[in-house]
Amino acid sequence: MDGSVRRREESEVGNGNGNGVVSPNRALYSDRRLRLNPNTDHKPDNYEDLKLDFSPSIFSSLERYLPPSMLGGSRDAKLQFMQEILSRYLPEGERTRVQRHREYREKIISHYQPLHVELYTMHPASFFIPSFIKAVSGNTEESFRSIISEPSPGVYTFPMLQPSFCELLLSEVENFEKWVDMSKFRIMRPNTMNKYGAVLDDFGLEAMLDKLMEEFICPISKVFYPEVGGSSLDSHHGFVVEYGQNRDVDVGFHVDDSEVTLNVCLGKQFSGGELFFRGTRCDKHVNSETQPEEMLDYSHIPGQAVLHRGRHRHGARPTTSGHRVNLLLWCRSSVFRELKKYQKDFSSWCGECQREKKERQRQAVAATKLELLRREGQSMT
Ligand SMILES: [Zn+2]
């Protein structure tokens, strides 16, 4: 560990600047503004059949904020108006990147022949163990706590996946990698820190993983991580990482590009590879000291999940023998990311912001006491 935390990012280019292109429709709608509060009675159109720069669900949710006069209009008119608004959030460079990535994905999906088609749609009863399904359908903190342990504040572990599901997924990933080798297709690795592993979303598992996030992770993160957008998760990055001989050995101290991370060991036989945690930090405090109570070492058990905040600093120790594969789901909240831009104090989740806040309070109390003593002293003379 070199003491400084790397931000583990996807292999993507960051945001560029807008190029100032003005659509001809801008003038047409320039006098119309979005409502402050959504019209909850309005039933939005469905945009799923269109190829858009943003997820179709974003258009459906944004539609509720359209000016009242537009709600009865055609889908095309609404779409144009919303695209105009959203384009300000997606500069040209970013749009090109999204388009290229879409083509990359389509190329893989049209050539790669899945081995286990049953993995590509969500089947809870064959994916998850019964206690996990029961806890999630209970949908209360109490039902979650019945299967969850919290070995350190903010780190939750629980048995989750069926051994048969782990085997199928391992074999699907192996099959995909065999195809990559044979076809000489150049794939993108999951992030800047892992040279091995594969992005599951890139070869057809995106829809299944979306369901996994929405129906099984969101209910839990809503209860345990509301302060980091746990109740508004709306996108994910799903991948596997592989450790062992001829694979990655370990991964250094870092934070994830996620609000909430699900990390599940799929197998196989291995020793070493423990996760170490060192407290949650905001951007400003990412390299600050670790308090003793924030130290946690966790040994992976196949089928068992670890859930933590993306900003919880962690790393993986060397896998000393065998072969270890883990499923990672980085869950993100666009709402949280937007709001974060306007905040300075993260004491609801950053250990260091919290420590500083307590210190300020302690000093304020001490100053007040001193002032009282001083006044008492004056009144005695
Ligand atoms: Zn902080």
Image: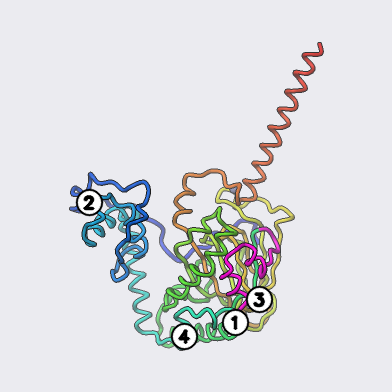
The C terminus sits in image quarter: top right
The disc label shown at residue 22, or none: 2
Which callout, 2 or 4, points at the residue further toward the start of the chain? 2
Q: Are marks 3 and 2 in contact (CB under 8 Å)?
A: no
- How many numbered badges does the structure rendering display? 4
Residue 56 x %, y %: 34, 65
> In the rendered structure, which segment of residues is drawn in magenta?
129-153
Report the residue at 56% width, 70% height from top: 137
**Callout 1 environment at 10 Å: few (<14), some (14 to 19), or many (20+)?**
some
Residue 353 x %, y %: 62, 46
Q: Residue furthest front?
A: 41
| Residue 18 seen | no
Residue linked to disc 3: 319
Which callout, 4 or 3, points at the residue further toward the start of the chain? 4
Foreground: disc 3 or disc 2 = 2
Q: Is residue 132 magenta?
A: yes
Q: Secondary structure at mark 4?
A: helix
**Callout 4 environment at 10 Å: few (<14), some (14 to 19), or many (20+)?**
few
Does residue 340 appear to the left or right of 185 in the view shown? right
Q: Amino acid at mark 3?
A: Thr
Which callout, 1 or 2, points at the residue further toward the start of the chain? 2
Q: Secondary structure at mark 2?
A: loop
Report the residue at 55% width, 51% height from top: 283
| Residue 365 seen | yes
The N terminus sits in image quarter: bottom right
Q: CA distance from mark 2 to mark 4?
A: 46 Å
Report the residue at 35% width, 56% height from top: 41
Residue linked to disc 4: 118
The disc label shown at residue 162, or none: 1
**Callout 3 environment at 10 Å: few (<14), some (14 to 19), or many (20+)?**
many
Q: CA distance from mark 3 to mark 1?
A: 23 Å
